[in-house]
Amino acid sequence: MKKVLCLILALLTLLSLLCACAKQAEAPETEPLQQPETEAEAEAGAENQLQPNAADPHYHSISGVPKPPSFMDAEYVLDDPSLRSGKKTKDNARVFYEIFVGSFSDSDADGIGDLRGIINRMDYLNDGDPDSGRSLGVEGIWLTPIFKSPSYHKYGVTDYYTIDPKFGTMDDLRELIALCHERNVKLILDLTINHSGSRCQWFSNFVAAHQRGDTESDFYDFYSWCGPDRPALSGHRYQTIPGTGDAYECNFADTLPEYNMDSEIARQALLDVAKYYLEMGVDGFRFDAVPHIYYGNNLRSAAFMDWYLGELRAEYPDMYAVSEVWANDSITDLYVAHTNCFNFTTSQYGGLISATARGGSAGVYALYVENYLNRIHRYNGDALYVPFLSNHDTDRSAGYLSLSGGQIKMAANLYILNSGSPFIYYGEELGMRGYRGESDTDANRRLAMVWNDGDTVRDPVGSTFDDQITTGVAEQIEDPDSLYTYYKKLLMIRHANPEIARGTYKAYSVPGTQVGGFFATYKKSTVLVLHNPSRSAVTVDLSGLGLSELRAAIGMGGASLSGTTLVIDAQTSVVLK
């Protein structure tokens, strides 16, 4: 009888629980949302929902679902008062981080990196406090193309006003912009204004206009073309427009038709695209393949950029602009009056940074930078030196510089502890590898970020590289001796000494040695940055230079300052004041 009573009580308890659950399911979880009465109210409401709440540690998620404990909780913290500045960067002399979006971080387990993945990883890039000793500390992010496109790299845009569904939504972009600005990070987008994809509606309209012979169509001259009455330009590549005697220009590939920049309609359309995203809050752009705007004619391409950027800056004077002009300095000089240019002379295996890191003269490198700055400032007083080691179109530097031999760290010193606006390629701070190899594919240069914490991002389609590092973010953030921690310290040294990035630059060499660097004077304060890329310690006499403080030392060794005598270890850099 006792067992029966117990069974009845248990059944009654279960029934009570089921009723309670049913009532909870019927009741709304929140108060119903009041529908806006007007379109303006709807837009304002959507905007308000996208603003992060700074007081809420879980603000990352628009949906309101709290984020899990940060994957950065185990990070080794750099707790050194000399690395703190107490200030936030206000100008463009900041360190940027290039993200190849599809390979960075995957938020929805489809194997493809996306905008939500970047949002989720913001604590890794910048935690909002430059003095915290946590996070990498970059203050700018460059996203490779995110617009709708059938290719994995997205450089063949089919719709500039739609985020590629594999990467997320426009709301994701708005949230990322708000998060970046909250943490004093500038966000720039990769903008291809030389060509579109062949599936772009603009191109379809262009083809249809030619097939109809409709010379009055707005799209008839939207793209560059040749025909029976319009001769092809020598050295340019064309593809026949089906059903016509005309052909469109496509110097990169048949699937990448090139705009006709003599068309006022095409110019305005591309101007409208940039203004749309600047109005949204994007801080600027990296412009792709700028010399191809007028293929083979740098003077005309530079003149176009002068007009284009002039129109944009008339409304958005603080816009950041950097352009890909993959050429020597005599060519980039044509463009720097209007736009910053990546410096290819000092990049990659054959560049001055790599050559110096492998034991070359730091004085020679510094003298080049001084001459470069003096020259570009004659064209544009606000122009910046924009150094980098590698990017999504080049072999990664870890393939030709040694980590154990100190070359990777010295190279990092040379371009981070320098004037202007350096760009770090994602994973450079981990020592990630990747090069074209025998497969001759750029996909091998754009491999998945090595998180090692369960991130589902995969290598892009077509990649064949199989010699990637095994020690990723999860391991390196905990290790005080990792390359990640080294980069983090470098960025903090740079930030704590604002003279380095923006001071008046004067090269300096130590005779008879490979040691060299530069004086940088900013707001009546001067520092001396010295690099010793050699394999031996060097003693430097600082007599007469007015330096009394060793502000920082970083590299494979250390440094000491006794009076005016500096001893700097091999493959080590110092900041003196």
Image: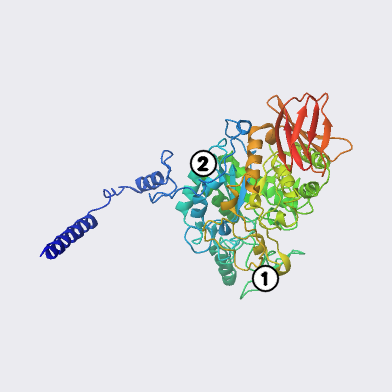
User: Which of the 4 image quadrants contains residue 563?
Assistant: top right
The location of residue 573, given as percent across then percent down, is 74, 38
Q: Residue 504, how many percent across, how many down? A: 73, 31
Residue 524 visible here:
yes
Query: What is the quadrant of the N terminus in the image?
Result: bottom left
Query: Mark 1: few, some, or many residues within 10 Å (few <14, many ≥20)?
Result: some
Whole-percent x, y for residue 554 in the image: 71, 39
- Quadrant (top left, top right, bottom left, bottom right) of the C terminus: top right
Which labelled disc corresponds to residue 239? 1
Q: Residue furthest bottom?
A: 243
Above or below for 262 versus 459: above
> Mark 2 = which residue?
181
Instruction: In this rendered view, identify the residue nearer to me: 86 or 484.
Output: 484
Above or below residue 170? Residue 284 is above
Seen at 58% across and 52% down, the residue is 475
Disc 1 marks which amino acid? Gln
Residue most toward the right?
A: 512
Q: CA distance from mark 2 to mark 1?
A: 44 Å
- Secondary structure at badge 2 equals helix
Is residue 66 shown above or below 15?
above
Q: Residue at x 77, y 43 (%)?
A: 571
Q: Quadrant of residue 152?
A: bottom right
